[in-house]
Image (cartoon, helix red, strand yellow):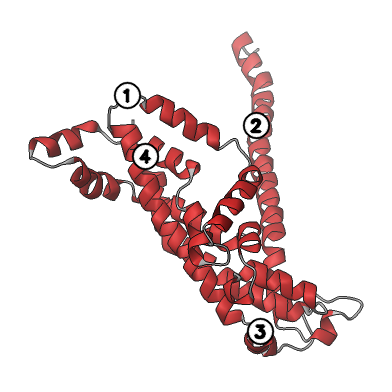
Amino acid sequence: MLPNTAVTSAVTRPNRRAETSGRSYWPAVGRALAYVVLIVATIATIFPFVMMLFTSVTPQSEVVSFPPRVVPATMTLENYRDIWTQIPFALYFRNSVVYATTVTLVSLLFDSMCAYALSRLSFRGREIVFIVILASMMVPAQVTMIPQFLNLTALHWVNTYQGLIIPHLTSAFGIFLLRQFFLSIPRELEDAARIDGANEFRIYWQIILPLTKPALATLFVFHFTYNWNDFLWPLIMTTSPTMRTLPTGLALFMGEHNVQYGLLMAGAAISAAPLVLAFIFAQRYFVRGIVLSGLKE
């Protein structure tokens, strides 16, 4: 006869194998479900852009046909050619470049300077200033839009570049984001620079800013995307076609004429190109920021 221990092990060994196989089965199911969810989310995210591109190369007669088709039967580039002649698209594009680029670059400078003062300098009332900046983030932009418009009207800045650009040259969100990043930089670096005789601006410009490229790149994409797609403020501040930006120009074109979906999608595809380029430019800094954030203690 077998000993009791041998009998017990012979009986329990198959049960343990069944438990082990069951445990190894559920992680595989979880990974498969995660992949399915990610694939569905990816398709749902990409599908509108694919439809935009297909519609932009579809003739108008086929766009309005029924039943609708995802892939057009005939493709043409006439919409990309006609968009430059049907509306002053080049003028809208120039205004968007001037508005979005100027606001983004200047706001990066002002936001970083203010964030440096709030994170690295000691002065009376610093925390109060920071709290006021945070409180301004809770005020909707629509609340301050009418007072801003009245002030700019008194300055005769309506329908001008300065009226579009100057009110948006800094943002509370940018100051908050950069301040939090600046706080993670060791103070020993600036202390060593002060010993070597560097002043505050040199420390800010040559030491702090080069270390914050990931945060600056992230804020650049946020600012540029928001200002490039901004619709309400340029709509209020511009009254002539010569000052309209791409979002307002395309929207007013759609309202003034019969909706030509191919032309609109061609204009939308062209206007989305700078945003894609901005993300590609800043992508390596995003990856670097993730790596560095994992190394910080």
Residue at the spot of label 2? 23
Residue at the spot of label 4? 115
The spot of residue 279 in percent (x, y) is: 49, 61
User: Tag 2: residue type?
Assistant: Arg
Number of disc labels: 4
**Horizontally, is 134 left or right of 209 in the view?**
right
User: Tag 4: residue type?
Assistant: Ala
Crowding near the residue tagged with mark 3, few <14, some 14–19, many ≥20 C-alpha atoms within 10 Å = some
Residue at the spot of label 3? 83
- Secondary structure of the residue carrying tag 2 is helix
Kindly report the distance in space between the C-alpha atoms of the residues bearing marks 4 and 3: 43 Å
Crowding near the residue tagged with mark 2, few <14, some 14–19, many ≥20 C-alpha atoms within 10 Å = few
Is residue 130 or residue 162 the one in the foreground?
A: 162
Kindly report the distance in space between the C-alpha atoms of the residues bearing marks 2 and 1: 60 Å
- Secondary structure of the residue carrying tag 1 is loop
In primary-sequence order, the first of circles 4 and 3 is 3
In primary-sequence order, the first of circles 3 and 2 is 2
The spot of residue 102 in percent (x, y) is: 43, 62
Q: What label does residue 124 carry, if any?
A: 1
Eye-nearest disc, 3 or 1: 1
Kindly report the distance in space between the C-alpha atoms of the residues bearing marks 4 and 1: 16 Å
Kindly report the distance in space between the C-alpha atoms of the residues bearing marks 3 and 1: 56 Å
CB under 8 Å between callouts 2 and 1? no
Kindly report the distance in space between the C-alpha atoms of the residues bearing marks 3 and 2: 59 Å
User: Tag 3: residue type?
Assistant: Ile
User: Tag 1: residue type?
Assistant: Arg
Eye-nearest disc, 2 or 1: 1
- Secondary structure of the residue carrying tag 4 is helix
Residue at 69% x, 53% y is 41
Q: What label does residue 159 carry, if any?
A: none
